[in-house]
Image: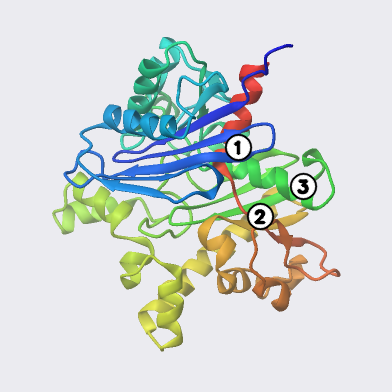
Amino acid sequence: MTEARPHRVLVLNSGSSSVKYQLLDMRDGSRPAGGLVERIGEGSSRLVHTPPGGGEVRERTEPIADHAAALKAVAAELAADGLGLDSPELAAIGHRVVHGGKHFTEPTLIDEAVLAEIERLIPVAPLHNPANLTGIRTARELRPDLPQVAVFDTAFHTTMPEAAARYAIDVATADAHRIRRYGFHGTSHAYVSRRTAELLGKEPSEVNVIVLHLGNGASASAVRGGRCEDTSMGLTPLEGLVMGTRSGDVDPAVVFHLKRVAGMDTDEIDTLLNKRSGLVGLCGDNDMREIRRRIEEGDEAARLAFDIYIHRLRKYIGAYYAVLGRVDAVVFTAGVGENAAPVREAAIAGLEELGLVVDGELNAVRGDEPRLISPVYARVAVAVVPTDEELEIATQTYALVRG
């Protein structure tokens, strides 16, 4: 009898003070286990683990000094369920890496050269790539014999033409400092655009899709025939749509103005635009449910924040319609996109001349499956497609290691 081939992939997403993890069975896409370690390096670190079969969630609070200790704690939780990192059923570990620059256009087996390149990209991803590197190095120490794969947030967007990827600044300066539009949320945009084609009963190569990934971070993409043509985030995840705490598009001269007139230094401006702007800067809340509740109570600040959010979103829908020329579907995904019916309704309202209409009853339905929310007569489909970045990372990782 031949031994069964390894069929599980552990997906790791290492943030600056957290590690999210999911173990996936690639035979059916099921998730035997998963969890989160947060507040790493603080005295009250927290680990939440979901065991196989929907068993009782295990949670504990204790000091976890660093990412190495966090991953060892994760390994211990998995081992307690008989799913340890030494399991012969584990085929690979897939790592989410935020920034791959121009060099990494697809999932990549990790070796020292790959690590060195990810490290060289730290200046354009100072908050994310260092944490990603720490997670990778720790996992490799725990299982040096196991294939480990980097799946890059930026990879899906490397198909953008230079006309979309270049900023209109001095070419020599831009090239010397790697200044260009990279885009992010790429695994989500790849997954959702492909699932949208399936929903329409077509191949990805046959459809043009505008994907709206709306969570606390938010981005839009124009996808032509399965390839990214344009996306809203740029050199960093700050550009583009109004987000939970990020401003999105602003006049670059705002930075100079704040420095000269307000006396703010670079770090203060960075904090302002990334952590004290967007919805929270406009009305004090970045939870769309709370903003909608406040609007219903007549809160004008919440109403203005919502209107600014929708105005920017509609601008990008129109812009990407023009970029693509023909649009087969506009699709909403991520926390806000999947759950906030008023956002979807407001974003599409008044765009009937573009063939875009939302059916009120269909839009009000909640569910975990991809679904159309446009009426049958609509020229362009409007859809809700739940994203699954962990499954996308696992799928790309498994395909690479299986050859």
Instruction: Give left or right: position of 172 versus 90.
Output: left
Between residues 395 and 103, which one lies in front from this camera angle? 395
Q: Is mark 2 on a helix, strand or loop?
A: loop
In what quadrant of the picture does the C terminus appear? top right
In what quadrant of the picture does the N terminus appear? top right
Q: Is residue 13 above or below residue 45?
A: above
Identify the residue under disc 2: 385
Instruction: Give percent across and percent down for residue 182.
Output: 49, 36
Residue at 40 percent of width and 81 percent of height: 294
What is the C-alpha distance between the residues marked 1 and 3?
16 Å
**Residue at the limit of the structure toward the front, as seen here:** 1
Between residues 185 and 75, which one lies in front from this camera angle? 75
Instruction: Give percent across and percent down for residue 135.
Output: 36, 28
Identify the residue under disc 3: 197
Q: The residue under label 3 is which amino acid type?
A: Ala
Q: The residue under label 1 is which amino acid type?
A: Glu
Residue at 50 percent of width and 33 percent of height: 11
Q: The residue under label 2 is which amino acid type?
A: Val
Question: Would you say the residues marked 2 and 3 are in contact, meaning their CB atoms lie under 8 Å apart?
Answer: no
Of mark 2 and mark 3, the one earlier in the sequence is 3
Q: Quadrant of residue 71?
A: top left
Q: In this view, does 90 lie above or below 163?
A: above
| Front: mark 1 or 3 | 1
Between residues 278 and 372, which one lies in front from this camera angle? 372
Q: What element carries label 1?
A: helix
Graded by Cα atoms within 10 Å as few (under 14), some (14 to 19) or many (20 or more), the crowding at tag 3 reads many
**Residue at the limit of the structure toward the bottom, as seen here:** 298
Of mark 1 and mark 2, the one earlier in the sequence is 2
Q: Quadrant of residue 395?
A: top right
Identify the residue under disc 1: 392
Graded by Cα atoms within 10 Å as few (under 14), some (14 to 19) or many (20 or more), the crowding at tag 1 reads some
